[in-house]
Image (cartoon, rainbow, N blue to C red):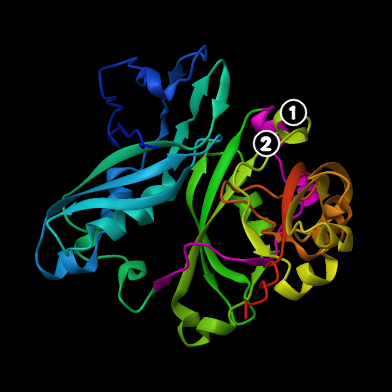
Amino acid sequence: MRTLLWVVTWWGLALAGGAGAQPPAQYLGAGKPPITPPGWLRKPTQEELQQNWPLAASQRGIGEGRAIIACAVTVRGLLDQCTVLSETPPNAGFGAAALQVAPLALMKPAMQGGQPIGGFRIGIPIDFQGGPQGGRPLPSMEPTSYQLTTAVWLAAPTSQEVAAHYPKEQLKGTVGHVVLHCYLDAVGGLKSCTPLQETPKGAGLGKAALDLSKTFRTDVSSYKDRLPLTFIDVPFHFLDPESADWLHRTIAKPRWVAAPSVEDVEAAFPAKAKAAGVFSGLGRMDCLLAVGGKFSDCRLVAETPPDLGFGPAALQLISKLAMNPWTVEGLPTDGTRLVVPLQVSIEPPTPPTKP
């Protein structure tokens, strides 16, 4: 399937086809309402672009550049799965710099039928002008610094902790967003965190995020040699704990961090299915995500094919699954109910060779 890119800019939304343009009919589906593309809520400032000026461009005396990145806009308006489409001039580092400032952006998600939809991809040209702030790039762009784009969190703030940090008096039911720029310590915690983005300002969201950052832990054993210089940008999305968005929040793109092994699947595979010559089936379960990304309170919804034991096998194997306890949008996963389809398959036996 083709991907539709809406071209936008940091300094003003410019949609292909003009203001209010809609995607071609083939992207809508028969009878579906039109899609309203994403729009800007918060764009990285020129100062932030200069703060992330690439070292290679600075060393070569390059005073301006452009990068075009493609990103998916989540249901909460964050940029996700960004990739560099082009950079000018080449090999000057503007592509990497554009990816680094992407977490600072916040958009209105695409809308269809009055509901936000995630995964709508946009193309974003980012113009860097004026040279690095202070005449030199930030240390975070030095070759001796390393960015961890995603982390498998062994521990993260729980939904109860995040809800307790929502500033009710200041936000009065509205949404807040923070991105923290943090370094990793020797045990995989976060240290030296500073807010890169805080929306809205003056509501205490930066302090709330800094308090919550003390909970994060990740495994750092694979890059201990780079540890003092490894950083990560961590998003926080603050929703009113009494709102429907919080109480019925969903996980658009689960990040799996553990799965059943081949041995686990073989041990759980239903004997009835094997005897019937069926070596693949599906169990669909409705589960509650617990603290730490594990599943609990799972109920079988359906199994395919029926009556061969794939449902009970899936319920047995769900204990081996785990999800990252913090989403890319900056929300805890625990307390969320979701339907989990689990494929249960083994290799069929090799037929005997004919003499």
Q: Is residue 346 above or below residue 207?
A: below
Three-letter code, disc 2: Leu
Q: Quadrant of the N terminus?
A: top left
> Foreground: 313 or 102?
313
Q: Quadrant of the C terminus?
A: bottom right
Three-letter code, disc 1: Ser
Q: CA distance from mark 1 to mark 2?
A: 7 Å
x then y, percent, for residue 239: 67, 36
Q: Are marks 1 and 2 in contact (CB under 8 Å)?
A: yes
Task: Give the residue number, with chain letter if any, for mark 1.
Answer: 243
Residue projecting furthest to the bottom: 225
Q: Which residues are magenta?
A: 146-173
Residue at figure coordinates x 49%, y 64% from the top left: 232
Secondary structure under the numbered disc 1 in the rendered image:
loop
> Foreground: 73 or 264?
264
x then y, percent, for residue 20: 34, 14
Residue at figure coordinates x 56%, y 15% from the top left: 113
Q: What mark, if any, has residue 351 been given in the picture?
A: none
Magenta stretch contains residue 161: yes
Residue at figure coordinates x 27%, y 35% from the top left: 9
Task: Give the residue number, with chain letter if any, for mark 2.
Answer: 239
Residue at figure coordinates x 31%, y 39% from the top left: 123
Instruction: Classify 10 Å Cα crowding around label 2: few (below 14), some (14-19), many (20 and above).
Output: many
Count of marks placed on residues: 2
Q: Is residue 323 left or right of residue 298?
A: left
Q: Is residue 123 left or right of residue 76?
A: left
